[in-house]
Amino acid sequence: MSTITVPIDEPRSLGSKTSSFDGLRVAIVHHWFVSMAGGERVVNAIAGMFPAADIFTLVLDKRKLPPRLRDRKITTSFLDRTLLARRAHRHFLPFYPLAVEMLDLSGYDLVITSDSGPMKGVVTDLESTHICYCHSPMRYLWDAHSAYLREMSPLVRALFGLASHYVRNWDYSAAQRVDYFLANSNYVAGRIQKYYRRESTVIHPPIITDGSFLANTHEDYYLAVGRLVPYKRTDILIDACQLLGRKLVIIGDGPELKHLQKRAGQNIQFVGEVDEQTLKNSYAHCRALLFAADEDFGMVPLEAQSYGRPVIAYGKGGSLETVAGIYPPIDLDGDAPLNGVTGMFFQEQTPASLAQTLLNFEAIERRFVPEQIQSHARNFDESVFVERLGKFIECALTDKENG
């Protein structure tokens, strides 16, 4: 199985190949469309590169489709015939292999799988080129498997253990079918190597920076944005802000909402899902974005930085690639601008560690340079993603043709 090195930062001559990919039959495959999160934004960008591509997925909620997919031909798996699968798709884990392999990908020249689940296992033609853009190996099968088991009742633990053993073995085998792997971060590239024994090229996901702006004034609140699910660790943000009596505005919804509301005091404001303009204004006027997740990549910190706002993040995972941060202890004296610095990291995933970092941040808050923070975020713009992915695909197609 071949690997290729693509000089994604430099222009290349590819002979007769062009960036238009004219004449190719292209399929874009994504695990499920049940929310509009980072993976769906990646698919939206890829779809813009291939206006005639067909779309395949396991389950589909048409209300959650990215804009560029709303008029596309979309094929779903047999799982989509039941409404329950859309609402609780993760409970159908034992059926993933069968559902994926029954998708008909015959006749396509290029298959691009957008995968943090089982989609890498699609069966393609011998002549086709299969590129997997991997957001992450399934955490509940691999590195976080034990943590998931600990949260389950004995009966559910036994059933999940049996199902996950089978699907994990299939998932490893499915990864060997991929011609070329792309990873959304160096962090994920390391997991692809460890669990699948495959090399990958890193191309960071895209964010939209065209509409971002720098506010003239900022309000006295910290901001959290994202799905309210356990691994996001929104509880840490709440507890830290309550320790210090700081206002925290939380944008997003999810299964943890009621639990977090019971935990929160009057200084914590839950606003739920908001429209695009409200989100933009919230980013632009906050003191800083707080981010406590051990994330594979994390688009939210970059979105906040595109508005010139610093990010205070847990110093692990994708945040180390998206935030040009500094660790405490730091020199709190002086007024020199923090050139090239876009945020701060806290070292432990605890309220106490975050609270101390917040105090350190407030002591040097005036030294952050919004224009430089915004400039950093623009290195991850969708235009950069499209250019790099286009070059990689051209190189992969040429490599496949040359055998």
Image: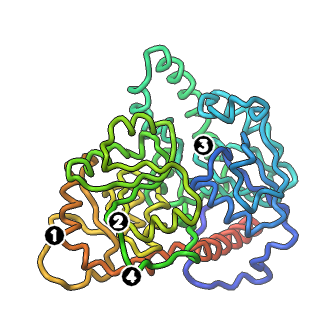
Cα distance between the residues tagged 1 and 3 = 40 Å
Q: Amino acid at mark 3?
A: Gly
Residue beneath label 4, please? Answer: 372
The mark nearer the N terminus, 1 or 4, is 1
Residue at the spot x=62%, y=60% of the render?
Answer: 41
The mark nearer the N terminus, 2 or 1, is 2
Q: Which circle, 2 or 1, is nearer the viewer?
A: 2
User: Considering the numbered disc 2 on the image, is that residue within a helix, a strand or a loop?
Assistant: loop
Q: Which circle, 1 or 3, is nearer the viewer?
A: 1
Q: Position of residue 275 (x, y in %)?
A: 59, 59
Query: Which is more toward the observer, 336 or 260?
Result: 260
Q: Quadrant of the N terminus?
A: bottom right
Cα distance between the residues tagged 1 and 4 = 20 Å
Query: Which is more toward the observer, 280 or 391?
Result: 280
Q: Position of residue 283 (x, y in %)?
A: 45, 66
The mark nearer the N terminus, 3 or 4, is 3
Q: Quadrant of residue 123?
A: top right
